[in-house]
Amino acid sequence: MKACLRVCTAASCRSRGGASLQHSLSEAVARAGLEHGLRVKGVGCLGPCSDGPLLAMDADPKAQTQLYGSIPVADGAQLVASLMEAAAQHTLAHWCPAGGLRIDLNHPFFQLQRRLVLEHCGQIDPTSIEEALAAGAYRQLERVLQNNNPAAVIEQVRRSGLRGRGGAGYPTGLKWAAVAQMPGTEKVVVCNADEGDPGAFMDRTVLEGDPHTVLEGMAIAAHTVGASRGLIYVRAEYPLAIARLRTAIAAAQGHGWLGTAIAGSRCNFDVELRVGAGAYVCGEETALMQSIEGKRGMPRPRPPYPAERGVFGLPTLINNVETFANLPALLRLGLETYGRGTKVFSLTGHVRRSGVIEVPMGTSLRTVVETMGGGTPAGRSIKAVQTGGPSGGCVPAHQLDTPVDYESLQSLGTIMGSGGMVVMDDTTDMVDIARFFMAFSREESCGKCVPCRAGTVQLDNLLEQILDRRATPEDLEQLESLCRMVKDTSLCGLGQGAPRPVLSTLRHFRDDYLALVPVETRR
């Protein structure tokens, strides 16, 4: 028997015993002397986090991979013995670990995905550069360096329509072109890995499962814009991502894919980590730069933009994890095959199957939530889907046929954001949801500008008043007016986006607000 057991050791499965499962299986295989016929390896996210810990089995190159969930972690020896017995009886195709469940890989959750960014997540050992190289890592970087035509790369990125996947959706090609045009020999490439939205874990998944894809994207960008220094700003709450990034950076340097004269070219590019303390506002690029420089993370007015004067006063290119991770796939596939690209989402909330998915841009919300996620459990109906985190809004159930793209979601009063998607059933109080996100924004406000510092407090107070049934119809009008003022006058994206959950729920779920206004106060 020659087989490989891939154990998900990403953060979600680790919280359910994934790392212990890997250790238990490895020990059992070693004790049984089966190392040459049965390999156990830890991998990144396998997708359906709600079914963790997850185990994939590749038993035969001609046979379909088998995926199992809810695996008991206590007795690896029993699991291995059961597996060997099934192999001896030629019944591996029907084998399932005792106490676990077999997951149908033909389910739409898997079949409707298009994995470009996540192509190698769950397939390779993220701590092994040898496996990453065998899967194609750094091939596009090598090709770009050999061709040595930065302008052509920028033009391909521009024509692809790739937009920043971190929330703002700014055209990536335009940003690269702006930095490339800046004079000087010192420039910086920054990867924004400060993922802080409640319910969002897309970037963490990529960093934990395939860090070399991000490093390759950064190196391609550095060569293209003329940068020699790279910084990855990652929040301290991601210890596993930090550890795997450090391992990947050291390995890439050792193999000549980072550092001096990369792949024998004139390209020099060093990457280092900056670990942030977890302030949500540091996801905003100017606040992020302040934090990198050792200052308090607070935004500053623009212009000057980072492309002109960024980290340490140098021209700086800032993209998020997923944006950089798109680059190898885009260059490998070409414009026609790449098409509109994809978006990675973390699907959570009142949904039967939660986890990380990657779908073609333009896939409808209904397809993601109902077809892939299986809809709500316990016979409830969907009331809303919240996208974009604290800066996003809530889409009502009757609008679920809306395609997932920047313009369509904006027309409904929300944003795609970094990719968090929270499903809410018909038991959800939308005013309470609005209050939750407003309280988050209030606590995370850096306090630099008055509209955000004072406005989020007042909005939170008004929402509390409404939830306590102490509001009047005039208070609802004041709530909406104050939301628009904070949105229009705040300095950065935190304050500008903070009112969006309130405005979207007022727009689509006003009855939830009116139900909390005492009848005697209505005219």
Image (cartoon, rainbow, N blue to C red):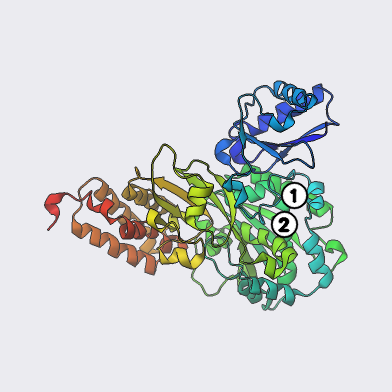
Residue 78's place in the image compared with 414, above or below, is above
Q: Is residue 296 visible?
A: no
Name the one closer to the observer, 279 or 523: 523
Residue at figure coordinates x 54%, y 62% from the top left: 362
Amino acid type of the residue tagged 2 in the rendering: Leu
The residue where tag 2 is placed is 215
Name the one closer to the observer, 118 or 88: 88
Q: Is residue 334 visible?
A: yes
Q: Is residue 518 left or right of residue 324?
A: left
Residue at figure coordinates x 63%, y 57% from the top left: 321
N-terminal of the pair, mark 2 or mark 1, is: 2
Q: Position of residue 292 (x, y in %)?
A: 60, 58
Q: CA distance from mark 2 to mark 1?
A: 8 Å
Amino acid type of the residue tagged 1 in the rendering: Ala
| The C terminus sits in image quarter | bottom left
The residue where tag 1 is placed is 248
Q: Quadrant of residue 399?
A: bottom left
Query: Do labels 2 and 1 touch, CB within 8 Å?
Result: yes
**The label number, if any, that marks residue 423 in the structure image:** none
Badge 1 marks a residue whose secondary structure is helix
Name the one closer to the observer, 489 or 338: 338
Residue reaching furthest to the right: 264
Residue 350's place in the image compared with 164, above or below, is above
Q: Position of residue 33 (x, y in %)?
A: 84, 24
Q: Position of residue 256 (x, y in %)?
A: 84, 57
Q: Quadrant of residue 314?
A: bottom right
Q: Quadrant of residue 7?
A: top right
Residue 202's place in the image compared with 9, above or below, is below
